[in-house]
Image (cartoon, helix red, strand yellow):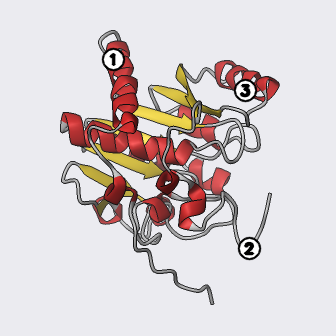
Amino acid sequence: MQEKRKYVFSILDFYERESPVSTEFGRVYSNLRYYAAKRTLKAVLVTSPALGEGKSTLASLLAIEVSHRYNKKVILMDCDLRRPILHHLFALERGKGMAELLLGKANFQDCLKFTSLESLKVMTSGQEIQNPSELLESPYFGEVITEAKHYSDLLIIDSAPIIPVSDPLIIGAFTDGAILVLKAGHTQREIGKRAVEILKNSQVNLLGVIMNNMKEILPYYYNYKYYGYEYSSSRKRR
């Protein structure tokens, strides 16, 4: 039986609207809005080339910034069904999320979890499953994304890294574009170039690249280690 974990701190507990982090993500959203002035932008995929580059934290901070500063209705969706982390970051229960929704065990509204920000809702990954790619390839997945866009001004989707698995490409087909997260001093140049290549070859629109940790701007409480969690599964490693 899997041990239940009690979550105490949420990333929202440490968010400060006038902080350098908030300012940077305000700039990111401004760039997205500039893009949206030319095209429709309702669903954004956030991914990275490989493990440990901070994509989930950055997706969360972007969702918080858009919801809090701009009062937009945001749904932050955890489609990383392999090593999910959004439930840790927001101190939420993992269950009754994306997996249950795609398996037909719950409806969309039941899988949305409230946060302390009225306009921000999170859909966690749900139960652990053995076949993430197969589940994401379900015809129902497109309907889920359509419904999420209906209930939000902006849908932000966190996915698995792009080099190890094809999940982001499956998801990317249903979004308006992707943000690629790289980590300074960590992501190898050739790996980053390969990730961009894969996105372009799969016709996933690359909205831009975020270079994470350029000057170690993220304070300690945004680091995965603060949550006692690394981007891996306690049961299995890939």
Percent position of residue 101, x then y: 44, 61
Front-most of residues 35 and 222: 222
> CA–CA distance between discs 3 and 1?
25 Å
**Which tag, 2 or 3, sits closer to the chain's start?**
3
Marks 2 and 3: which is nearer the front? 3
Q: Residues within 10 Å of mark 3 (few under 14, many from 20)?
A: some
Q: Along the line of sight, which residue is nearer the eye, 26 or 220?
A: 220
**Residue 81 position by quadrant:** bottom right
The one nearer the camera, 129 or 154, is 154
Q: Residue beneath label 1, please? A: 36
| Residue where numbered disc 3 is placed | 192
The structure residue drawn at horizontal position 37% and vertical position 14%, both measured from the top left corner, is 35
Q: Earlier in the sequence, mark 3 or mark 1?
A: 1
Q: In what element is the residue under mark 3?
A: helix
Q: Which residue has dot 2 on it?
A: 235
Q: Look at label 3 and name its amino acid.
A: Gly
Asked whether the viewer can see residue 150, the reply is no
Q: Earlier in the sequence, mark 2 or mark 1?
A: 1
As displayed, is residue 94 above or below residue 156?
A: below
Res. 18 mark: none
Q: Nearer the viewer, mark 3 or mark 1?
A: 3
Q: Could you say where residue 132 lies in the image, as x and y percent from the top left? A: 64, 56
Q: Which x, y percent locates residue 172?
A: 55, 33
**Residue under the point 38% across and 68% down:** 106
Real-space Cα distance between discs 2 and 3?
28 Å
Q: Residue at x 24, y 44 (%)?
A: 151
Instruction: Tell me, yes or no, whether the two marked residues, 2 and 3, touch with CB atoms within 8 Å.
Output: no
Q: How crowded is the residue under tag 1: few (<14 C-alpha within 10 Å), some, or many (20+)?
A: few
| Secondary structure state at the residue bearing disc 1 | helix
Measuring from the top left, give residue 67's x and y in whole percent: 25, 42
